[in-house]
Image (cartoon, rainbow, N blue to C red):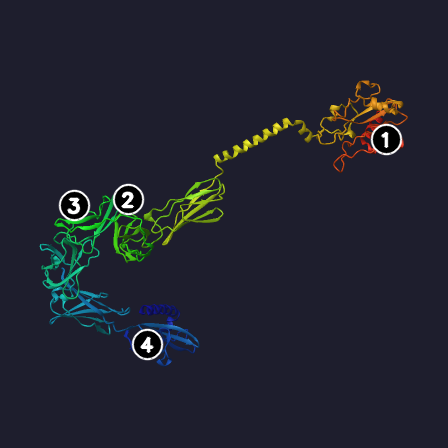
Amino acid sequence: MASVWLSVLVVLWIQMNGLLKGAKACGEVVVNTSSVVPVGSSISASCLINNDCPLTKGKQFRVEWKINNDLVPSNLSYLESNGTYIVVIPHIDVARAVITCSVCVEDNCQVVDGSLVKVAYPPPIPTNLSCALSVNEPIGMLCQWDPGQKMENIDLTYKLHTKKGTTCFLYVLPAGVYSYWIPRQELSLSLEMEIHVEVENTFWNTSSERLLVMPMKTAKYGPPEVQGIEDHELGCLRYRWSLTESQNWVKLTFDVELTLKEVNNQLAKELVISKRASQGSTIKVCGLPHWTNYSAKIRVRYYNLWSEWSDPKVATTLSRAPTGRLDTWLKVPADGVTAKLYWKPSQQFRAYGANLSYIVELKPKQTLCDTTEDHCSFNISKRVRKVYLTAQNGCGKSTPTEVPVYRMKALDPVSNLSVHPQSNTSVLLVWESLVSSRVTGYILEWRSLNESVAAKLFFTLLKKNCSSTVVTGLEPFKPYEISIYPKYMDGIGRSRTVMVYTSEKAPSVAPTLNFEKLDSSNVQLVWDEIPLEQRNGIIQGYTIFIWDEKHNIQILKTKKTNVLMKHIQPFSTYHALISVHTLGGSLNGSVVTLTTEQIGHIEIVLFVIPVCVGFSLLILIAVFACLGKHERLKMCLWPIIPDPANSSIRRWTTTDSLQGMPPFKEDKDPALVYLSHFSLLDLSDKEICNSDYVKDNLWSHDSGSHDEGHNLFQTPSSYDSQQDTDSVPYATVLFSGPYQNQTGSPPVYLRSESTQPLLGVESESGSPPPYENISERASKVNYFTTFPLEPTENEAIWEDFPMLRSLEIRITDQI
């Protein structure tokens, strides 16, 4: 608190100095008392205002006083003489006081000067005065105390007063020192001394409470030493002790405390022996077991303060033959001859020796094994019913422990076995007891799984009515395998086995992800199991986080050591991270990266070869089809159809006229064929009217009987409607003379009775309609009839026969 006030005052003083720079010539403050005053005293100060002060010259003003920036009441100040103002503060109770004088004109006040006064408080009383004698060289006594709250503004002086009998000693301490070492020659070791501390400042002095002390009782001795151990008497040990060499000058009787504890036996209780003894004496302890290792340590005190414990010393009692029986656990398979026997000391067993060995034998004397371990394996026949276990040391053998031979049988195990951690070193096992009267007890065994197969096995024997037990001595974060066997009258039942942890935490390491590519779009992530010693708990499962460059995240959870990654894209980068979980926590592994490439060369070959083979087969099939069906394919793709409207008259044969025509199916009417041939004949008027000529000569089968002078082009080939239906004359145009000389009567034409439509004309019904006769004369003509072409009928006739119209145009042009 004083430091806070000091900071405030310093700030005020700095501000005041800044204000006084401009008003220093106006006045001066003088404190009429000392610069240091005791708290509660009065302070008087005067302020002299100069006549030539610019703040007051020719003005009405008043003077104000402040202490630590607090206004002093006006009744405490007055004007003593011209220009001198006095203030009297009757009571001061602050550590530091800054007194300022200000000149005020109306409401404007200006500080002209100030002064600092220190206030002294009574010093705090020293407390917790204590003294302790040191018995080591150099011998002396150290006294120390608590100074209390420190005074920041006043210097304090500490004095230590001691009195030895009638002699007094005074020790003045430097500032800031609160302890003092009193030398040996100024002490009275076995007599009481009076000691106190005095503290003073300028105005006061105070003193601590007086301490009466005998130096020897304040001494704290160093740890003693066990100089020797004797074991001459059976079951007894004798310890000889003394102080350290630097403390041997002390000849006193001390309180001595000796503790003994069996080595390598955590269950043994610690023995404590207390007695009064002087240094150099011995302490005898009896009633100890034979051949037992004991660790002993000792400490002493003279009055109040115990020394530190000495270093432990180990000693062994005298040996004799072991006594007591051993707890055993014999495991014999139902169909085997190899047995495993485990044993441990029971509560009644006493080894009475360190170098123990064990013998397993049959009666009469037939040794099965002789070992210093706590287990062994041997072969026994099915007729053996008992084996015997004996412990021995250098002094003799124990009474043999009888071990019945119970073989493993398919008898009912316990049910509902559960494990409940109790602490970091123990678990509680609970099961449902069997109700069978043949059950005589249970055997509980456990071993660490972090070690090798030959890890030490622990076991305990339980009674038949037991349904729970606590297994202790386990280590946290390590796996243990615990099994319980029911013990029947005639054998050992099936076991129940569980793996337990007393406590779990996150695994020490995480699995490393590896990629196994299955095909172009699927990848399998695989990893190895964490080593058992690094799991720190039972693995509950794995979580795999997968994300791509677009931050699309896929989360997969599994309890297996592999997972399938589907639908991957080529030329992409994937990142994966695995997290392994136990009940105690989770641990993330490192991020691995997979960069997918284009389809592999093998996959390309496997894909391209079938495609090429299939494409080649299609080409071969198409080529063979084109070669085998050339005419039909040509007809379907680009059929040859003559266009009479854009044709000139030339010689057409039956073969030429049918080329490119699609064949007819046999189920169609053979009379409904397409006509693609016509002929022109030059006949006389007499022959035209002769119908027999038309029948006999015009369509004669003998093409050589026609007059070549009357055939403008070529006589039609012989035609048989029953044998050849590929080509049928569409019409025959008859002339009475050479067409060059036809100037009078119009030509006539014969109308065919065929139902074949004109080329290029399609019927709306899809089948060619039969042609109708134009006139009654035409209907009387058999097959082909001659019609005189009247000029008035030409246009109507040519509308029905566009091909003949074209023919007329061409003939007219030639004429």
Give the mark, 1 or 3, whose residue is nearer the N terminus.
3
Q: What is the CA distance from the residue labelled 4 to the residue labelled 2?
A: 117 Å
Q: For this view, does 588 lie left or right of residue 203?
A: right
Give the mark, 3 or 2, whose residue is nearer the N terminus.
2
Question: From the viewer's perspective, is the residue at label 4 or at label 2 nearer?
Answer: 2
Q: What is the CA distance from the residue labelled 4 to the residue labelled 3?
A: 121 Å
Question: From the viewer's perspective, is the residue at label 1 or at label 4 nearer?
Answer: 1
Residue at the disc numbered 4: 45
> What is the crowding at mark 3: few (fewer than 14 residues within 10 Å), some, or many (at least 20)?
few
Q: For this view, does 568 lie left or right of residue 720?
A: left
Residue at the disc numbered 3: 364
Q: Quadrant of the N terminus?
A: bottom left
Q: Who is closer to the viewer here, 756 or 801?
A: 756
Q: Residue type at mark 2: give it.
A: Asp
Q: Who is closer to the viewer here, 203 or 517?
A: 517
Q: Is residue 304 above or below residue 334?
A: below
Residue at the disc numbered 1: 778
Question: From the viewer's perspective, is the residue at label 4 or at label 3 nearer?
Answer: 3
Q: Secondary structure at mark 3?
A: loop
